[in-house]
Image: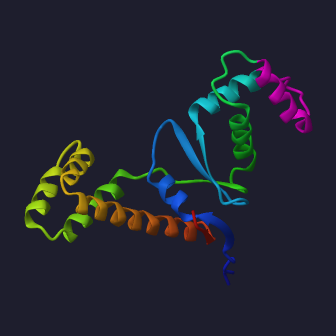
């Protein structure tokens, strides 16, 4: 008989998670801190700086001395692009990955495209619906879709709310899949 695990209750700011889910780049990764509920972004520049600094540390450095040695090395380093605090956050994520920190999934352009299609179905104006349907065909669909909506401020605002609701649903689904019961914070 399979035992059902109890969801882990985590305080989260759903709006921050929605923003993070909707943001994607090869230049950074996003993580959820399961202790604080904070969404953390670690850039590739920070990771690169951390690797470069770690290469200067002694190989036999005891774990309990690592942070102090890292801070000292950062303070002496030339050409460091990242602040020490950012490097220490990256260390925290690396050390706690899978236990304290969960990687957020990357934004999926197919889901974004389906969001646009679903929104178009809700548009009351036949003219606008047709313009949007044409806009989402081919390369550059997201940009053209936004450009069309720019001329229709009320529909543009409705699109933002529609999309946020859809992303919020994906966030809730992801949290449930990860066995997390969100305790929502506002603001």
Q: Does the magenta run of residues contain 112?
A: no
Residue lying farthest top?
78
Q: Residue placed at 69% from the left, 40% from the top?
A: 90
Q: Residue placed at 15% from the left, 57% from the top?
A: 133
Residue lying farthest left?
127
Q: Residue placed at 25% from the left, 65% from the top?
A: 119
In front: 10, or 108?
Answer: 10
Q: Quadrant of residue 6?
A: bottom right
Return the x and y of residue 61 as percentages of the image width and height: 89, 29
Compared across the picture, whether 87 is left or right of 73 comes to left
Task: Tell me the quarter of the image containing the C terminus.
Answer: bottom right
Give the extent of the magenta segment. Answer: 56-76
Q: Quadrant of residue 170?
A: bottom left
In front: 164, or 177?
Answer: 164
* 167 to 103, vertically: above or below: below
Return the x and y of residue 11 as percentages of the image width and height: 66, 67
- The majority secondary structure of the magenta stretch comes to helix
Q: Residue placed at 10% from the left, 59% from the top?
A: 130
* 2 to 12, vertically: above or below: below
In front: 16, or 103?
Answer: 16
Compared across the picture, whether 19 is left or right of 7 comes to left
Return the x and y of residue 155 as percentages of the image width and height: 23, 62
Compared across the picture, whether 143 is left or right of 80 comes to left
Residue lying farthest bottom?
1
Return the x and y of residue 96 as percentages of the image width and height: 74, 50
């Amino acid at each position: 008989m399979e035992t059902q695990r109890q969801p882990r209750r985590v305080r989260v700011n759903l709006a921050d998670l929605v923003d993070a889910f909707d943001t994607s780049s090869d230049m950074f990764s996003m993580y959820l801190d399961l202790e604080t509920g904070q969404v953390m972004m670690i850039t590739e520049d920070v990771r690169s700086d951390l690797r470069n600094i770690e290469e200067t540390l002694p190989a036999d450095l005891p774990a309990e001395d690592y942070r102090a040695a890292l801070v000292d090395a950062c303070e002496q380093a030339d050409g460091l692009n990242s602040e020490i605090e950012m490097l220490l956050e990256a260390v925290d994520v690396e050390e706690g990955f899978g236990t304290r920190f969960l990687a957020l999934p990357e934004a999926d352009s197919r889901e974004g495209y389906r969001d646009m299609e679903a929104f178009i179905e809700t548009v009351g104006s036949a003219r606008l619906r047709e313009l949007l349907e044409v806009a989402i065909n081919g390369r550059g669909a997201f940009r053209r879709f936004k450009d069309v909506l720019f001329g229709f401020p009320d529909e543009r605002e409705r699109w933002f709310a529609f999309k946020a609701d859809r992303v919020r649903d994906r966030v809730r689904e992801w949290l449930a899949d990860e066995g997390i019961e969100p305790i929502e914070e506002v603001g």
